[in-house]
C-alpha cells in the first residue's frame, strides 16, 4: 500500500461524516458545539483560500491553539491537498520560527488566540508567507499588513467563499505528507517526522474498528496539536461521525468534572493525568460511568494508576498504548484485565502489549541480532505505520531506520523491552539520553545546548527528575565552572529558547560534574544526588 490507488486521504473520513451527519456535533470547543456542517464550511473557506491565493506547496502551517481555527485549520489545510504543520503558541518564538523555516511552508493559518504572537513570528520569518486569518477582521490586521508588506495577510473578509460541501482533494498520494511533527533533537534543532496519508489511515482504520467508534461517541482531546497523539483524537472522531471534545487548558491535568459534564465515552491522555488524580485521591469508584474506553499513551503507565482509573470507570475497557511518532501515534497495546492484570501488574509498570494488526515488533541486541523471548534488548518496529524518516535529514534517517537480515525495514526505538512467552512486550526503560517528561519526548542534549548558550564557559548537564516508571515530572540542570550563578536568570533564558516542559525547574551549581568509567557525564549519579537531597 504505497500508491495513490491504495490509500485514501486522511481527511476523507471527515468528508464522509459531513455528508452522513451534517447536523450532528463534530466539535466541542470553548464552551460551544460546532456541527459537521459548520466545521466543514469553516474549513472549506480556508481550503478555498489556500488553493486560490497561496503559492503552490506541499505543506501549510497552523498557528492556533484549542480553538475552532485550530481544528478547522487542520482540516482546511488537508482539504487544500497539503500536509499540515502544527505550531504551538506556548513554544518560544525562536523555536516556532525555526520549525516554520525547516518545514518550508509558504502558507500559515492563524487563530485569533495567536494574533498577539504573529508579529514576532513574521519578524523571525524570511520567506514571504500567505497568512490566512479566518477569525480576524481587516481592521485588526491592517497595522500588521502595513508593517510586513512582504507577507500577504488575508482577514476573514478576504477569504474565498465555500458554498458547496468541500470536495476530496485531488492528486493526493498515499506517500504524500499528511502532517509534519517536530520532536526534540539532540543537535539542538527540532527534528521533523513526516507522516504520510498511508501511515495515518492505516492507524485510523485499525483503531476505529478496535474501539467501535460511532456517531454517539464523545472523544476527549487533551493534547496540543504539536503532540502527535492529537491526531488520534481528531481523526478517530471524525472518521465515524463522533464529537471531538476539547478539554480546556486549565482542566487538562484535572479533567474529572469535564469528563462527567460532557458525558465522554472515550478518554485518551498521558498516564500522568491518572497519576495526578490518583495522588489527590480524586479517582473515586464509579466516578466516570459514561466511559466505554480509557486509553493511555506517551509514557509508562504504573499499574496502581490503572487499577485506580479502572475503578473510577467501571464500564470502561482500559488500554495502555505505545508508539513513537516515527511509527505513527501508537503501534502496540495492552488491554487491562481488572482481575488478572491487577493481580500481576498492580505494583509494576503496565506492559505495552502486542503489535497492531499489520505491524511488526522485534527485539535485538547491540549487534542487531534478533533475541529470543525472555531476553531484554532494543525494540524495533515495522509495518505500514512506519514513516519514511526524518524531514530533510538522510543521515539521521539512515541511523534510525535500518534493514535487518530479513530484508525488512525497521525503526530503532531506543527503548529496552523484554518479550514474554506469549509475545507480550514489557517496557524496561531507555538505552540513551532520550527521556519522557510529562509525556513529551525530550533529548537531554538539546537542553544541554540551551544551557551552554546561557553559560558558554561552563560545563552543564540536564537530568530528568524525579522519575516515575521511566517518565519525569521535570528537568533539573547542573552547572559547574565559570558561569552566572543566578538561577532565575538561567531558567528565564532557557525559557526563551525551549518549550516549557523542557525548561529546568531548578539549577544546581557544583564544583565539577561527575564522570563514569567511560569518561562521560554521570547523569545517573546526578539524579541519585537529587534523590539523596530529597531525603
Image (spheres, grey):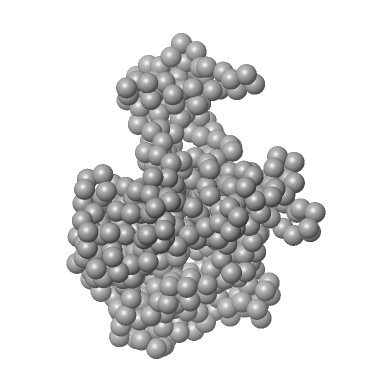
In the image, residue 453 sits, relative to residue 114, either above or below, namely above
Residue plotted at (58% across, 43% down): 416
Q: Residue at x 68, y 72 (%)?
A: 2
Position of 115 relative to 509 (above/below) = below
Instruction: Quarter of the image for the C terminus: give it.
Output: top left
In the image, taking residue 237 as reference, residue 403 lies left or right, namely right
Q: Nearer the viewer, residue 282 or 327?
A: 282
Relative to the observer, which residue lies in front, 329 or 36?
Answer: 329
Q: Residue 327: x percent and y percent?
A: 58, 58
Residue 84 pos. (x, y %)? 50, 63
From the viewer's perspective, tell me whether residue 527 is left or right of residue 364: left
Q: How many marks?
A: 0
Residue in the picture at 51% in, 34% down:
444
- Depth check: give the residue in front, 117 or 289: 289
Question: Which residue is nearer to you in this view: 270 or 14?
Answer: 270
Q: Position of residue 221 (x, y in %)?
A: 35, 63
Task: Give the quadrant of the N terminus.
Answer: bottom right
Q: Is residue 441 visible?
A: yes
Q: Is residue 163 visible?
A: no
Q: Residue at x 52, y 17 (%)?
A: 514
The part of the image, by quadrant, that contains residue 316 is bottom left
**x, y percentage for residue 503?**
39, 35
Measured along the vertical axis of the image, is residue 190 above or below residue 54?
A: above
Name the image quarter holding residue 527: top left
Amino acid at each position: 500500500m504505497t500508491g495513490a490507488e491504495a490509500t485514501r486521504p486522511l481527511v476523507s473520513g471527515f468528508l464522509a461524516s459531513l455528508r452522513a451527519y451534517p447536523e450532528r456535533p463534530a466539535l466541542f470547543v470553548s464552551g460551544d458545539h460546532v456541527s459537521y456542517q459548520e466545521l466543514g464550511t469553516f474549513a472549506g473557506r480556508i481550503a478555498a483560500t489556500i488553493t486560490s491565493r497561496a503559492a503552490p506547496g506541499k505543506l501549510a502551517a497552523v498557528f492556533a491553539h484549542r480553538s475552532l481555527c485550530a481544528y478547522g485549520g487542520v482540516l482546511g489545510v488537508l482539504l487544500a491537498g497539503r500536509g499540515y504543520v502544527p505550531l504551538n503558541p506556548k513554544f518560544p518564538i525562536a523555536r516556532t520560527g525555526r520549525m516554520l523555516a525547516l518545514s518550508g511552508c509558504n502558507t500559515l493559518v492563524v487563530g485569533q488566540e495567536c494574533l498577539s504572537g504573529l508579529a514576532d513570528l513574521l519578524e523571525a520569518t524570511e520567506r514571504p508567507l500567505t497568512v490566512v486569518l479566518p477569525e480576524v477582521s481587516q481592521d485588526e490586521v491592517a497595522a500588521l499588513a502595513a508593517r510586513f508588506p512582504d507577507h500577504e495577510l488575508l482577514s476573514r473578509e478576504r477569504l474565498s467563499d465555500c458554498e458547496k460541501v468541500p470536495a476530496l482533494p485531488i492528486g493526493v498520494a498515499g506517500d504524500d505528507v499528511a502532517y509534519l511533527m517536530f520532536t526534540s533533537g539532540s543537535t539542538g534543532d527540532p527534528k521533523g517526522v513526516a507522516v504520510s496519508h498511508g501511515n495515518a489511515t492505516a492507524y485510523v482504520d485499525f483503531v476505529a474498528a478496535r474501539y467501535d467508534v460511532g456517531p454517539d461517541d464523545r472523544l476527549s482531546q487533551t493534547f496540543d496539536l504539536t503532540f502527535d497523539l492529537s491526531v488520534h483524537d481528531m481523526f478517530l472522531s471524525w472518521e465515524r461521525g463522533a464529537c471531538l471534545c476539547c478539554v480546556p487548558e486549565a482542566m487538562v491535568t484535572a479533567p474529572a468534572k469535564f469528563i462527567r459534564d460532557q458525558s465522554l465515552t472515550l478518554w485518551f491522555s498521558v498516564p500522568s493525568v491518572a497519576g495526578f488524580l490518583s495522588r489527590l485521591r480524586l479517582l473515586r469508584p464509579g466516578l466516570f460511568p459514561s466511559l466505554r474506553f480509557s486509553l493511555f499513551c506517551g509514557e509508562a503507565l504504573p499499574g496502581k494508576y490503572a487499577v485506580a482509573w479502572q475503578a473510577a470507570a467501571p464500564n470502561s475497557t482500559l488500554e495502555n498504548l505505545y508508539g513513537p511518532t516515527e511509527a505513527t501515534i501508537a503501534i502496540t497495546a495492552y488491554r487491562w484485565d481488572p482481575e488478572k492484570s491487577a493481580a500481576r501488574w498492580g505494583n509494576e509498570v503496565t506492559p505495552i502489549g502486542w503489535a497492531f494488526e499489520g505491524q511488526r515488533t522485534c527485539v535485538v541486541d547491540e549487534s542487531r541480532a534478533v533475541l529470543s523471548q525472555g531476553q531484554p534488548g532494543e525494540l524495533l518496529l515495522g509495518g505500514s505505520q512506519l514513516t519514511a524518516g526524518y524531514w530533510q535529514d538522510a543521515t539521521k534517517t539512515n541511523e534510525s531506520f535500518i534493514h535487518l537480515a530479513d530484508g525488512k525495514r525497521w525503526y530503532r526505538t531506543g527503548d529496552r523491552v523484554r518479550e514474554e512467552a506469549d509475545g507480550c512486550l514489557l517496557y524496561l526503560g531507555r538505552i540513551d539520553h532520550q527521556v519522557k517528561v510529562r509525556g513529551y519526548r525530550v533529548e537531554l542534549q538539546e537542553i544541554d545546548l540551551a544551557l551552554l548558550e546561557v553559560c558558554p564557559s561552563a560545563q552543564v548537564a540536564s537530568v530528568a527528575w524525579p522519575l516515575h516508571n521511566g517518565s519525569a515530572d521535570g528537568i533539573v540542570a547542573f552547572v559547574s565552572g565559570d558561569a552566572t550563578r543566578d538561577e532565575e536568570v538561567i531558567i528565564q533564558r532557557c525559557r526563551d529558547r525551549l518549550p516549557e516542559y523542557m525548561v529546568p525547574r531548578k539549577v544546581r551549581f557544583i564544583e565539577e560534574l561527575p564522570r563514569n568509567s567511560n569518561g562521560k557525564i554521570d547523569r545517573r549519579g546526578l539524579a541519585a544526588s537529587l534523590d539523596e537531597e530529597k531525603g
